[in-house]
Amino acid sequence: MNPESGQSYAVYRFVISVNPMDITELNATLGNYILHEPVRAAAIFQSVCDAAVRTISLIEEYQSEAQINVILKVTHLPDLPGYHLSLREFPLDYRSQRLYMMEGTVIALSTVNKYTQGARFLCSETKCPLSTDFRYIRIHTPGATESATVRQEFFCDLCASPLKEDIKYRVLGDKQVVEFMDSKTLKMFQGQCTAFKNYRLQSYAVFLRDELIDRMKIGGRYRVIGIPVCGLNGSQLTVCIEANNIHQYIAHSPLTICKVFQKLHSKTQGSPWIFTGILANIFAAQVVPVGMHNTLKLCILLSLVQTCNEDKEIGNPLDLMVVTNDTLIVERLMRYSICLVPRGVCHTHFNDVLATVTKDELGTGTAIIHAGSALMAKGGVCFIGDINSHKKEKLDLLLSVLENRNTTVFIPGKKYGDGVDQQIYIPVQCNFWSYADLSNYSKKCTTKEPTFIGQMDLSAIPSHLIDAFGALINCNQISHTSPVVSLVQHSLIKAIRPGAFLCLTAQRFTTQDFEELIGYAKNLHVTFSTEAEALLHSYYLASRRVRTDSNGSKVLTSALRHLTSVAEAHAKLSLRRVVTEEDALVAILLFEASLTLKHGSSVFGVCQNPLFPSEIIDEDSLQQRDEYLRKYQQELRQFIFTYGPASVILTEQ
């Protein structure tokens, strides 16, 4: 118990952390008070603190028990249904002043402002004995507004004269308002609105005070212990929560993968590429035919395993940009894929991608920052749709976020009553997915003829954004054989038999199986082998050398970060804990294919689809793919030997 002592203090604040389970074992009655009547329990602790202060003469200016303000911080509540609060249940208990536990996500956060913790009032009649002592002390109670704590309507009990506040004894504290939404509504951000067609989704305010300030971050997921109260917001009654304690939500990750993937992984141990190749081939069989857009599906899986749990910071993000004439299939794939991670968000134009600032509707007069789609995708993926559907100023902000992984919110002081301008930096921890519709662009503008072999007209994508995305994928070639027939057949079966398994692959490898695989793989801690690091670094230097002209190098310094992220992701997807040369080769081939689309082919030439040169139909095709990749590995070594740094010597293994 630590009093916040100081000169001219009318109130001394004691913050006491209590474990209700331990208290209940010692004294069941007191434990029951803490759980169900916290105001009454605080009064008991107040009497104990009063006795202790008087006994040991802890505070010199101390006069009465009313000067002690006890805050009981409850460590946790019993994990029983009676202690969980849900706005969906009726009637809502906001009169009992008891503690509840709730789980949700922060969708908006206000700036910090002041509130009155306690104030001293004196009788205005100078001859009254109560005009000088500390009898009339007003202390903030859960749910009380500023006007309820400090106002002019108090009268002396002795002489009935009006009370006046002694301003020099007012004690101020910090207050912050958080807009909280039930965690179950996260699926709404994935575009699964049909699951909520019979519900009205509503957020509620959580008030943070003093020690709890800045404990909650925008877009974060938390468990809050607090007291529900009901107050006026203009002409309407509003339910809000007075927070007592806050705990970071800890996601539960799968400890293993399903047996069917375990069996597949054990059978493909002899090759570093077959397992991930099969995964890409069969992935999303519920929405597209098997074997369609394998390169894109592999990149999607790599980006998914580069996400993280909400209680951790994302390491090396992997952003995807797709150029295509078939936006329907690409969008269907990406919408399906974001549902495989807990924090996948499908951006809509009703929301902002990053953050917006408005005035707090609860009457505090301060600014409140609302989370956009990217902030709601904390630790996950934000699918922003067609890149050309966003305005230029928004794309400029997106470029800054892709480069720095944070966004800046400016709050003008004059507009929001503080008088001091504020600039707040918010980290953006998600992967971005987007696509560019080439068919729509070609109708509006004349397509330019490519200057170099393999180069593609990328005028549909804002030039300053092309290099900011980690992977650029061309998805105009749907499949190797009869793409239209397979797609039409798949769509017809899905329309005739909704909910049924469309093929044997979709029945054997379910969406839940992939969800567990991604949840397990993304939490693998991987390290880079010396050979993999040397290969990536040597390729980076060699590529910069061969792609340099009078305007400078076309390979940016951020390229090495993108290569590292893809290699790390491939090792995770392969369920390995060490990044090998084979993982680095996959990253290099994907990156070289992106460079070819942007600038044309180089000395180290790769085809349009280097990772899937032919259709995967049986074991022989998988073995041929392995031989093809081994050939690329030898060509890469020769390329590095010729154009790489002289100090690097790569020996054949």
Image (cartoon, helix red, strand yellow):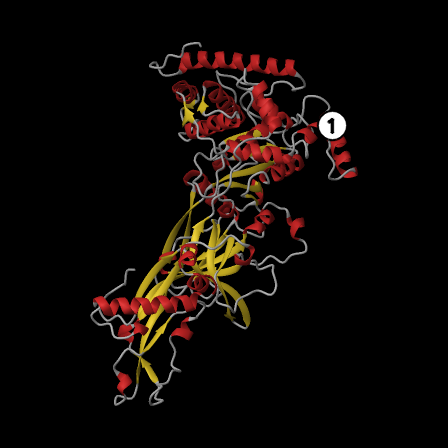
Q: Residues within 10 Å of mark 1 (few under 14, many from 20)?
A: some
Image: 143 above or below 381: below
- Residue 611: x and y in percent read 57, 21
Q: In the displayed structure, does residue 164 sit left or right of residue 84? A: left
| Residue shown at 48% from the left, 38% from the top | 308
Q: Which quadrant of the view contains residue 22?
A: bottom left
- The answer to which of 242 and 352 lies nearer the viewer is 242
| Residue shown at 75% from the left, 39% from the top | 498
Q: Amino acid at mark 1?
A: Ser
- Residue 441: x and y in percent read 62, 37
Image: 274 above or below 169: above
- Residue 549: x and y in percent read 42, 23
- The answer to which of 209 and 136 lies nearer the viewer is 136
What is the secondary structure assignment of the residue under circle 1? helix
Image: 162 above or below 581: below
| Residue shown at 65% from the left, 38% from the top | 332
Q: How many marks?
A: 1
- The answer to which of 599 and 341 lies nearer the viewer is 341
Q: Residue beneath label 1, please?
A: 486
**Residue at the farthest top position:** 652
Quarter of the image for the C terminus: give it. top left
| Residue shown at 52% from the left, 20% from the top | 601
- Residue 51: x and y in percent read 28, 69
Image: 28 above or below 542: below
Q: Is residue 458 visible?
A: no
Q: Is residue 447 visible?
A: yes
Q: Which quadrant of the view contains residue 557?
A: top left
Quarter of the image for the N terminus: give it. bottom left
